[in-house]
Image (cartoon, rainbow, N blue to C red):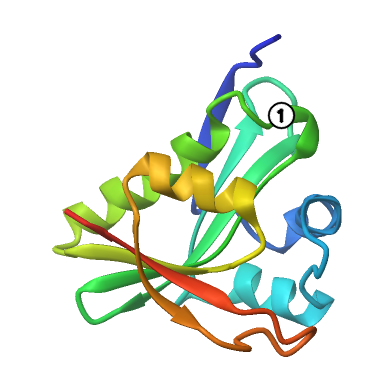
């Protein structure tokens, strides 16, 4: 396994990263987001966003996470890592960035939904420390998959 030096960015993650975000999303999910959803996340001042980028190659994005702040909780709405960079700690790095950001802003928990069939993601979140708190039938409108709501308490 070759580990590439990565750095986290937040404020710099803007619409100029659209093509890289879209590529990773398309390669990571059976049901990727619509382009307008990605654009909204990249341009909204209300979305908390972090990305893992190559330390020396400008605009070389390898993973990202988007979240919406709610009262005392941060709702993770998308976490994706380029398939060529998975199992190298980038997902954990991105989750730790969100956790640290939210802790420093008086948050108490992270919450997310994941497709009940996405066993790889469920395993990752459980290993990170999330707990399954609820099964939501037919949560996803694209194919009526159930979701698991997961919670991480500080």
Above or below 9: residue 86: above
Image-based side of 113 in relation to 110, left or right? right
Residue 10, visible in the rendered structure: yes
Image-based side of 39 in relation to 55, left or right? right
Q: Position of residue 50 (x, y in %)?
A: 51, 50
Above or below 101: residue 41: below
Location of mark 1 (residue): 85
In the image, farthest residue toward the top: 2
- Quadrant of the image for the N terminus? top right
Q: Position of residue 43 (x, y in %)?
A: 62, 73
Above or below 49: residue 37: below
Image-based side of 146 in relation to 132, left or right? right
Along the line of sight, the residue nearer the viewer: 118 or 92: 118
Q: Quadrant of residue 39?
A: bottom right
Looking at the image, how many numbered discs can be counted on the residues?
1
Question: Which residue shows up at 78% across the image and 59% down it?
Answer: 29
The kind of secondary structure element at disc 1 is helix
Above or below 35: residue 89: above
Question: Which residue shows up at 38% across the image and 52% down it?
Answer: 98
Q: Position of residue 104 (x, y in %)?
A: 18, 53
Image-based side of 105 in relation to 28, left or right? left
Q: Position of residue 54 (x, y in %)?
A: 67, 27
Along the line of sight, the residue nearer the viewer: 130 or 10: 130
Question: Which residue shows up at 59% across the image and 38% down it?
Answer: 52
- Mark 1 residue crowding within 10 angstroms, few (<14) / some (14–19) / many (20+): some
Residue 12, visible in the rendered structure: no
Question: Which residue shows up at 67% across the image and 84% down it?
Answer: 140
């Amino acid at each position: 396994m070759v580990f590439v030096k990565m750095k986290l960015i937040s404020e710099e993650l803007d619409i100029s990263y659209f093509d890289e975000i879209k590529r990773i999303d398309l390669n990571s999910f059976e049901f990727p987001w619509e382009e307008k959803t990605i654009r909204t996340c990249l341009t909204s001042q209300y979305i908390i966003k972090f990305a893992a980028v190559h330390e020396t190659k400008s605009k070389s994005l390898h993973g990202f996470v988007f979240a919406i702040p709610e009262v005392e909780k941060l709702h993770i709405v998308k976490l994706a890592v380029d398939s060529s960079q998975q199992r190298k700690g980038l997902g954990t790095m991105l989750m730790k960035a969100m956790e640290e950001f939210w802790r420093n802003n008086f948050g108490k928990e992270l919450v997310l939904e994941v497709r009940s069939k996405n066993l790889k993601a469920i395993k990752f979140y459980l290993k990170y420390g999330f707990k399954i708190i609820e099964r939501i039938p037919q949560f996803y409108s694209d194919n009526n998959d159930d979701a698991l709501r997961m919670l991480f308490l500080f």
